[in-house]
Structure formats: C-alpha cells, structure tokens
Amino acid sequence: MAERKFRVWRGNAEGGEFVDYQVEIEPGMVVLDAVHRIQTHQANDLAVRWNCKAGKCGSCSCEVNGKPKLSCMTRVNDYAPDETITIQPLRTFPILKDLVTDVTWNYEQKAKIKPLQPRPREADGTHRMQQEDVDRVQEFRKCIECFLCQDVCHVLRNQDRKDAFVGPRLMIHIAQLEMNPLDTADRIPELKKEYGSGLCNITRCCTDVCPEHINITDNAIIPLKERVVDRYYDPVMMIWRALTGK
C-alpha cells in the first residue's frame, strides 16, 4: 500500500507547529480520510471537526495546501504523488485546537440581522410569489455555512475588519431576505453603516471557493451594493432628500 506525506498543524490559541505524518493511502481516499487515519493510528488527540462526510454540513472546513476547502470533498489524488499535503485550520478565525477553529462570530453577526418579516397573507390565506423570485432566493438557501467564503475574504482574512464587514456568508443571507418579495423589512441602512457592503471590492474569491457553487459576488453582493448606491448616492434621490428633509 502506497504512503504519502501529510503535514498537519498541531496546537491551540497559544501556538503550535506543523507535524509530519506518513499515511497509508488507498484509492479514492479524501483528505478527511487521511486525517482520520492519522487520528486513529498516530495521533489520538488530533482535533478535527466533521459530521456528514458528504459535503453538506460544512463542518470539515480547513485549508489544504493554502486553499480553503472541505476536507471530505478534496481527493488525495488531486495532488501529485510526491507532493506533501499540508492541512491547517481556517486562518480567519481563532484556533481552538489543531484543525478546529471558533466560528462563533459568524452566528453572532447573523443574529443581528433583521429576520424575515412577511407581509400579511392575501384574502384567501395564501402567500404568492413568482417562480423567478423563488428561484432567485433559492440559490442562497443552498449555503451549508462552511465559512470557506468568510475564510478567503481578504477584508476579514488580511485586513481583520470583522468590526466593519459581515463577510460573504452574511451578505448572501441578507440578499436572501432582501430579495424575497414577501419581506417588508428594510435592511439597507444597516447594510451601508453596520454590515460594510462598501468594503467588498468584488474580487470574486468567495465565489471561487464555494462548494455549493453559489454565485455570491454577482447574484448577492453586487445587487446589494447597487441598492445602497440607489438609495444614498443617486443624484435624483439626493436632491429629493435635500428638498424634503427625508
């Protein structure tokens, strides 16, 4: 049975280092399989978060050779046979232990966003939507909250602006609500002032890493930025506000 070299980050919030492991590889193995084999045979205390192993729970997010990926969907044979496969935790979030990071911040931000506030039902007791409106928001509901888009976002990752920008994951959550024709809430002021829509410079790196192939940039972030511009920077609206004081 062939062996491959894996380099896994071991440590906690206080510090750590990469440790090398030789792992027996079988055909069809994914990176998470290799991590489990290391955990079983060489490092019983290796911490790793995972659940479904089917690319649908988002739990096993990590960085493989520097790129944010789901370890359960990343095949070992995607890398050259003589290439060392380096596995490390998501760099954008605080490390708890080994490959496990604390992603609590994402849920805290989500809790601040106004939930769906549907308009009253029609006379026959139903809500009606056009199919195209259903299709538009359905894409955003595919998100598995793996937070790979949050990890790769340079506003969060490199600039550490968690105080000013909620990140791609929360932008598609806002888009899902704002583009729902049944919703009556207004989130545009918060989108401009608190959620930091202006900080994204649409590099599309978040779209590139999304395992559900959600077009985060073009279908969510750009339309939201356009709504902010329409309200606050449209010259006609600026004149109207100056005349009316509204």
Image (spheres, rainbow, N blue to C red):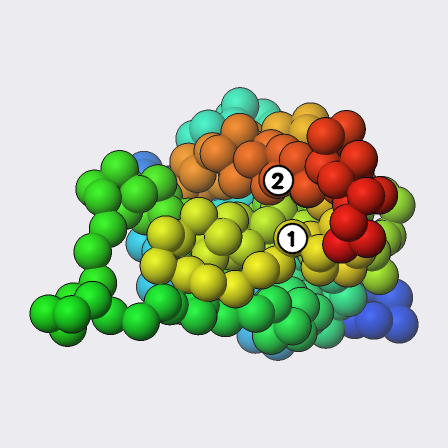
Identify the mark at residue 216; answer none if there is no mark. none
Q: Is residue 126 left or right of residue 77?
A: left
Identify the element where label 2 is drawn: helix
Q: Is residue 179 left or right of residue 166?
A: left
Q: Nearer the viewer, residue 95 or 28?
A: 95
Tell which residue pokes out farthest to the front in this image. 243
Name the residue type under label 2. Arg
The image quadrant that residue 108 belongs to is bottom right
- The residue tagged 1 is 188
Q: Position of residue 110 (x, y in %)?
A: 60, 68
The image quadrant that residue 149 belongs to is top right
Is residue 126 among what the camera can see? yes
Identify the element where label 1 is drawn: helix
The residue positioned 20% from the left and 56% from the top of the image is: 128
Classify the position of the N terminus by image quarter: top left
The residue positioned 84% from the left and 61% from the top of the image is: 163
Classify the position of the C terminus by image quarter: bottom right
Instruction: Tell me, yes or no, whether the two marked residues, 2 and 1, touch with CB atoms within 8 Å.
Output: yes
**Is 172 situated above or below 230?**
below
Q: Position of residue 98 (x, y in %)?
A: 69, 66
Q: Nearer the viewer, residue 126 or 178?
A: 126
**Is 203 situated above or below 61?**
above
Name the residue type under label 1. Ile
**Cα gap from disc 2 to disc 1, whole angstroms:** 7 Å
- The residue tagged 2 is 227
Q: Position of residue 147 (x, y in %)?
A: 58, 54
Is residue 162 among what the camera can see? no
